[in-house]
Each structure stands twice: as structure tokens, then as C-alpha cells.
Image (tube, rainbow, N blue to C red):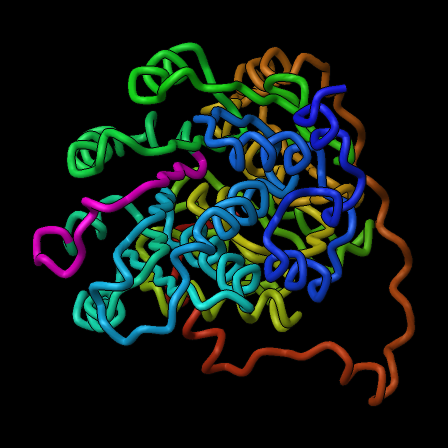
Amino acid sequence: MTQAAALEEATRFADLPLAAEVLQAVAELGYVTPTPIQRQAIPLVLAGRDLMAQAQTGTGKTAAFALPLLTLLKPYANTSTSPARHPVRALILAPTRELAIQVHDNVVAYGRHLPLRSAVVFGGVGLDAQEPALRAGVEILVATPGRLLDHVGNRTVQLNQVRYLVLDEADRMLDMGFLPDLKRILALLPVARQTLLFSATFDEAVTRLAQSFLVNPVKVEVARRNTAAETVEQVVHKVAEDDKLDALLTVVRARAIPQALVFTRTKLATDRLGRRLQRRGVRCAVIHGDKAQLERLAALDAFKKGAVQLLVATDVAARGLDIAELPCVINFELPYSPEDYVHRIGRTGRAGASGLAISLVAPEEEKLLAAIERFIHRPLPATPLPREQPVAAPAGRHEAAKTPRPTREVCALFLPPVRRESSDEAR
């Protein structure tokens, strides 16, 4: 067996040739066994190969590139206060603010024992707040493409010493409007660099495009192409459009779902569903692209703490939200793109845990459902709505206090103002 093959068969992180400081951090975080994508990708990254890695969301892609990058950057670690000693050597691009923040948090956690500087920059907040860290110098920069170009234009960051480039969620980066910005960024980078693309899906067009700026890349695929996570139970309930709200509440109560991420297709639909749930007394929050960054982070934090039961979101939340142990995803509306369905349900059933994905399908969404079934290569037969269980006796004061309830001010932060709706909209 070759050394590379032996490394791919590694059953413990300690078997991988990672820096001692990185292994220490991994051990402190409680990680023992690398996931399949980590076992395959880490040796290739350490060997200096360009990489196209395809793995489902929640399989550990961030550690698959962050751990070897920190190891490769260890020779450059230093405690000098001179910005010139801390040029950007690793650039990680992400399509959303949430994903950029999540990736940076992981980089900080994995590199806690190395004197390497890192920063994250994204839109939605002022440039001024991000400039001091960049001017002081960072070895690792996590960024969304547009905001990175803003800083390049202001001359607060230079990319002429980047040795490693990572595109996280590469299909979205290349396929959803980021291509012009990406080409501008690539033109600023040294030709001699290592490029890593990580994504849940790669279609043929994206693969051809990616190969145009990778050098002899190795393709790693750890799950059957275009499949949803095997640990996710996928349930379909066919209901009329006007009955979806009642169906949503029935499913949540009958299955005793403690928390769920609820997806709609548009920002307007997200706001409307949030108002309707609010009137029904449901603890909910709304998150989409028009929300200010602080509002989105506050809503996500409330959801993680249990103050919010249903987080209603557009597909801006399908990627990048770091929600550990999310029990359920509900498709209040099916997405137009089957790939987005895979990304949505990938929010649950992460890292081998079981998950539940429920889709409420109206007659006019039958074609969307058929496209999803073709894409994931499996049928999704409809089942009747579950029956609600009898309501239990009210909990005592001590038990009721276990579930935090948001204040009126918190609800006002997350949801648009309640307004009178037409009788047709209110149904």
C-alpha cells in the first residue's frame, strides 16, 4: 500500500501528518475520527494537489481544507507586530456572510495554538470596522467576493502573496452570479498557487469551468452524485396551497418537533409566513437577504438558544448556517432548483446524526417534486398528514420555565410589523 493510500485509510486524526498544534486543537475539540471527505482530502492538500472535492453538506468539508492549510502555513507563523510579516497567504472565498463567519470561526478554533492571524470580511457592515485587522496583516483571509473586491479597491488588502485559494460552496460561487467577481479576484492572485474547490454538487458546466483555472486537479467524491444525505428521513405531504399553514402546524405538533428550519422561495413569502405564525402564537424568527446582518445573527442566535421554535428562511440560509443537531427541515415551498432541495435538507442529519425533512407539496408544485426525484434518483411517495396527539396537561411552573420565550422586543426585531391582510391572504 502506498503512503497516500495508507493516509486515506487513516482511522484517527492522529494518523494524519498534521501539525502537532493542529492535532492538539482537534483533540481538544473532541474530534477523533476523520470523516470520509477529510480522510481523502487532507493527504491530497498536504501533497500540494489542486482539488475538486464533492461531499454533502455536514460531512466536514471545512476541516478537510482548514486543517491541512494550517499545517502548510505553520512555517510562516510568527509573532512579529509588523504587517509586512503577515501577508495574506491563504484566501478562502464563500458565497454568503453566514458561511464566511462559520468558516472563520472554525479556522480560529483549529489554529488556536499557532501564531497565525486570520480575519473575515463580508458585506452588510461598514468597511471601516474591517480595515484595522487587514492593515495589521493576516495570513488567512475568509471573504465574500464582493466585499473582498471592495477592500482591494480601498488598498486595505493585497493578494500578491496568496499561495492557497479555497472556494467553498464552489458551485454556488461559479453558478449564481459570482463569476465576474471571481474572475477579477483570480487575476489578482499569483499563478503559482494551490486551488481547492469544495462543494456539495458539481454539474458538467461547472466542472469544465473549474478546470480552466485548476492545474491537473484531483476529483474526490465521497457520496453518490446528486444524492441527499442517507441519514435524513424525507417525508412528503400533499396539501392544497391554502391549507399549508394548518398542515405545517399539524406536523409540528403531531411529531412534537422542538425546532425546525422552514424554507420558502421568496423574501415576501418568508415575511408573510412569519406574520401568520406570529398571529398563531408560534415562537418564530425570519431570516433572508434583506435583513441586516446583525438581525440575521441575532435571529440565528435566538434559534440556537431555543428561544425560537421555527426559523423561517429563504435559500440564503440553505448554505453556511452552522446549526448543530438541527432535528428537522420543513419545505413550506419546494425550491425551483433540485440542487437547492439537497442543500436545504442537508441542514439536518449532519455528521452521521439522523434528521427529518418534511415537504408540503401543493398541486402546482408536482413538477418541482418530479424534478427533485429525478435529481436524487429516488421516489418520494406522499404520505397522509400525521394525527395530532391529545394535548397534555399544562406543565408546572418549573417545567414551563425550561423553554425560554422571546420578549416582545425580540419578536419585533425578527419579524416585520403585523398588518391587516386581505381575506384571501389571511387564509
Judged left or right of residue 258, residue 369 is: left
**Looking at this view, is 396 or 85 the one in front?**
85
Look at the image and give the residue range highlighted in magenta.
152-169
Q: Is residue 202 left or right of residue 150?
A: right
Q: Is residue 59 left or right of residue 270?
A: right
Q: Residue at x 58, y 47 (%)?
A: 63
Q: Nearer the viewer, residue 276 or 39?
A: 39
- Up the image or down, 174 lies above or below 20; here it is above
Magenta segment's dominant SS is: loop
Quarter of the image with the N terminus is top right
Q: Residue at x 87, y 79 (%)?
A: 395
Q: Is residue 26 above or below residue 69?
A: below
- Residue 247 spot, x, y in % from top left: 68, 43
- Nearest the eye: 260 or 116: 116
Determine the residue positioned at 75% across, 35% down.
232
Q: Position of residue 259 (x, y in %)?
A: 69, 58
Quadrant of the rendered image containing residue 266: top left
Frontmost residue, 100 versus 132? 132
The spot of residue 290 in percent (x, y) is 31, 55
Number of numbered discs: 0
Query: Can the viewer see residue 250 in this picture?
Result: no
